[in-house]
Amino acid sequence: MKKLTLVLALVMVTGFMMAQKIQSKDVPEAVKASFQKEFPGAKAAKWDKEESNFEASFDNNKSDQSVVFDAGGNILEIEVEIDSSELPKGVMEYVTSTYPGKKIKEVAKITDAQKIITYEVEVSGMDVIFNEQGKFIKEIKE
Protein backbone atom coordinates (compact mmCIF):
# COMPACT_ATOMS: atom_id res chain seq x y z
CA MET A 1 0.00 0.00 0.00
CA LYS A 2 2.86 2.37 0.81
CA LYS A 3 4.41 1.75 -2.61
CA LEU A 4 1.09 2.46 -4.30
CA THR A 5 0.72 5.70 -2.35
CA LEU A 6 4.24 6.81 -3.24
CA VAL A 7 3.72 5.97 -6.91
CA LEU A 8 0.42 7.88 -6.91
CA ALA A 9 2.08 10.87 -5.24
CA LEU A 10 4.91 10.83 -7.78
CA VAL A 11 2.48 10.66 -10.69
CA MET A 12 0.50 13.57 -9.28
CA VAL A 13 3.57 15.70 -8.66
CA THR A 14 4.82 14.98 -12.17
CA GLY A 15 1.41 16.03 -13.43
CA PHE A 16 1.64 19.29 -11.49
CA MET A 17 4.81 20.15 -13.37
CA MET A 18 3.04 19.68 -16.69
CA ALA A 19 -0.05 21.69 -15.80
CA GLN A 20 -1.73 23.94 -18.35
CA LYS A 21 -3.88 26.90 -17.36
CA ILE A 22 -7.45 26.57 -18.61
CA GLN A 23 -10.63 28.61 -18.36
CA SER A 24 -13.57 27.59 -16.21
CA LYS A 25 -15.66 26.97 -19.31
CA ASP A 26 -13.22 24.18 -20.28
CA VAL A 27 -13.66 22.32 -16.98
CA PRO A 28 -16.19 19.43 -17.06
CA GLU A 29 -19.48 20.16 -15.31
CA ALA A 30 -19.00 17.19 -12.96
CA VAL A 31 -15.71 18.70 -11.76
CA LYS A 32 -17.19 22.17 -11.25
CA ALA A 33 -20.21 20.72 -9.41
CA SER A 34 -17.96 18.68 -7.12
CA PHE A 35 -15.80 21.73 -6.45
CA GLN A 36 -18.82 23.86 -5.53
CA LYS A 37 -20.22 21.13 -3.28
CA GLU A 38 -16.93 20.56 -1.41
CA PHE A 39 -15.78 24.19 -1.22
CA PRO A 40 -18.86 26.44 -1.25
CA GLY A 41 -16.97 29.37 0.31
CA ALA A 42 -14.07 29.27 -2.14
CA LYS A 43 -13.13 32.50 -3.89
CA ALA A 44 -11.77 32.93 -7.43
CA ALA A 45 -10.71 29.43 -8.45
CA LYS A 46 -8.01 29.25 -11.10
CA TRP A 47 -8.00 26.06 -13.13
CA ASP A 48 -5.16 23.96 -14.54
CA LYS A 49 -5.32 20.77 -16.57
CA GLU A 50 -2.83 18.11 -15.54
CA GLU A 51 -2.91 15.36 -18.11
CA SER A 52 -6.49 14.04 -17.66
CA ASN A 53 -7.04 15.70 -14.24
CA PHE A 54 -8.15 19.19 -13.22
CA GLU A 55 -6.67 21.33 -10.46
CA ALA A 56 -8.47 24.26 -8.85
CA SER A 57 -6.33 26.75 -6.92
CA PHE A 58 -8.30 29.05 -4.66
CA ASP A 59 -8.63 30.94 -1.39
CA ASN A 60 -10.86 29.29 1.21
CA ASN A 61 -11.32 30.76 4.68
CA LYS A 62 -8.20 32.92 4.24
CA SER A 63 -6.13 29.86 3.31
CA ASP A 64 -4.50 29.12 -0.06
CA GLN A 65 -5.64 25.71 -1.21
CA SER A 66 -5.73 23.52 -4.27
CA VAL A 67 -7.67 20.41 -5.13
CA VAL A 68 -7.13 17.89 -7.91
CA PHE A 69 -10.12 16.15 -9.50
CA ASP A 70 -10.39 13.41 -12.06
CA ALA A 71 -12.67 14.12 -15.05
CA GLY A 72 -15.62 12.55 -13.17
CA GLY A 73 -15.36 15.04 -10.31
CA ASN A 74 -13.73 12.70 -7.79
CA ILE A 75 -11.20 14.37 -5.49
CA LEU A 76 -7.72 12.91 -5.86
CA GLU A 77 -5.81 15.29 -3.59
CA ILE A 78 -6.31 18.39 -1.45
CA GLU A 79 -3.38 20.67 -0.65
CA VAL A 80 -3.67 23.35 2.04
CA GLU A 81 -0.96 25.91 2.69
CA ILE A 82 -0.02 25.87 6.39
CA ASP A 83 2.36 27.65 8.72
CA SER A 84 5.64 25.86 9.43
CA SER A 85 4.63 25.71 13.11
CA GLU A 86 1.89 23.24 12.08
CA LEU A 87 4.37 20.67 10.75
CA PRO A 88 4.88 17.42 12.67
CA LYS A 89 7.76 17.24 15.10
CA GLY A 90 11.10 16.68 13.42
CA VAL A 91 10.30 18.20 10.03
CA MET A 92 11.82 21.62 10.68
CA GLU A 93 14.87 20.06 12.29
CA TYR A 94 15.39 17.90 9.19
CA VAL A 95 14.94 20.86 6.82
CA THR A 96 17.24 23.24 8.70
CA SER A 97 19.99 20.63 9.07
CA THR A 98 19.73 19.29 5.49
CA TYR A 99 19.37 22.70 3.82
CA PRO A 100 21.33 25.07 6.09
CA GLY A 101 20.77 28.73 5.31
CA LYS A 102 18.11 28.00 2.68
CA LYS A 103 14.78 29.81 2.80
CA ILE A 104 11.51 27.89 2.96
CA LYS A 105 9.21 29.15 0.21
CA GLU A 106 5.99 27.28 1.09
CA VAL A 107 4.66 24.63 3.47
CA ALA A 108 1.58 22.52 2.74
CA LYS A 109 -0.49 19.67 4.15
CA ILE A 110 -1.62 17.22 1.46
CA THR A 111 -4.47 14.74 1.84
CA ASP A 112 -4.92 12.17 -0.91
CA ALA A 113 -8.05 10.26 -1.94
CA GLN A 114 -7.35 7.52 0.64
CA LYS A 115 -7.10 10.20 3.39
CA ILE A 116 -3.33 9.67 3.69
CA ILE A 117 -1.67 12.86 4.89
CA THR A 118 1.76 14.04 3.79
CA TYR A 119 3.55 17.33 4.26
CA GLU A 120 5.43 19.26 1.61
CA VAL A 121 8.14 21.82 2.33
CA GLU A 122 9.31 23.80 -0.70
CA VAL A 123 12.95 24.75 -0.20
CA SER A 124 15.96 25.33 -2.44
CA GLY A 125 14.20 24.52 -5.73
CA MET A 126 12.63 21.27 -4.58
CA ASP A 127 9.69 19.84 -2.69
CA VAL A 128 10.67 17.84 0.37
CA ILE A 129 7.95 15.34 1.34
CA PHE A 130 7.30 13.96 4.84
CA ASN A 131 4.76 11.48 6.19
CA GLU A 132 2.17 12.30 8.85
CA GLN A 133 4.63 11.39 11.62
CA GLY A 134 7.23 13.82 10.25
CA LYS A 135 9.56 11.24 8.71
CA PHE A 136 11.32 12.16 5.47
CA ILE A 137 9.95 10.37 2.37
CA LYS A 138 11.66 11.98 -0.62
CA GLU A 139 12.80 15.09 -2.49
CA ILE A 140 11.23 16.13 -5.77
CA LYS A 141 13.15 18.63 -7.89
CA GLU A 142 10.91 21.29 -9.38
Image (cartoon, grey):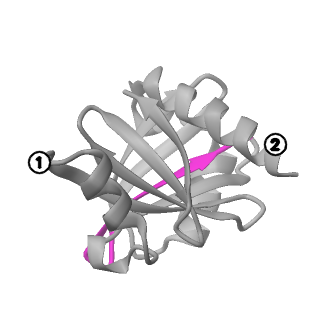
Q: Residues within 10 Å of mark 1 (few under 14, many from 20)?
A: few
Q: Position of residue 138 (x, y in %)?
A: 54, 41
Q: Amino acid at mark 1?
A: Gly
> Which residue is at 69% across, 49% downward?
30
**Residue mark closest to the camera, 2 vs 1:** 1
> Which residue is at 73% across, 58% downward?
113
74 left or right of 66?
right
Identify which residue, 93 or 142, lies in the foreground.
Answer: 93
94 left or right of 76?
left
To which quarter of the image does residue 23 belong? top left
State whether residue 55 appears in this view: yes
Q: How many marks?
A: 2
Identify which residue, 99 or 56, lies in the foreground.
Answer: 99
120 left or right of 46?
right
Q: Which residues are magenta?
A: 60-71
Q: Residues within 10 Å of mark 2 (few under 14, many from 20)?
A: few
Q: Is residue 86 above or below residue 102?
A: below
* Secondary element at tag 1: loop
Q: Amino acid at mark 2?
A: Lys
Q: Position of residue 132 (x, y in %)?
A: 59, 70
> Which residue is at 39% across, 41% downward?
127
Q: Position of residue 55 (x, y in %)?
A: 50, 42
**Mark 2 sits on what residue?**
3
Mark identifier at residue 101: 1
Mark identifier at residue 62: none
> Which residue is at 81% across, 51% downward?
2
Identify which residue, 29 or 109, lies in the foreground.
Answer: 109
Mark 2 to mark 1 CA distance (whole Å): 33 Å
Q: Main secondary structure of the magenta part?
A: strand
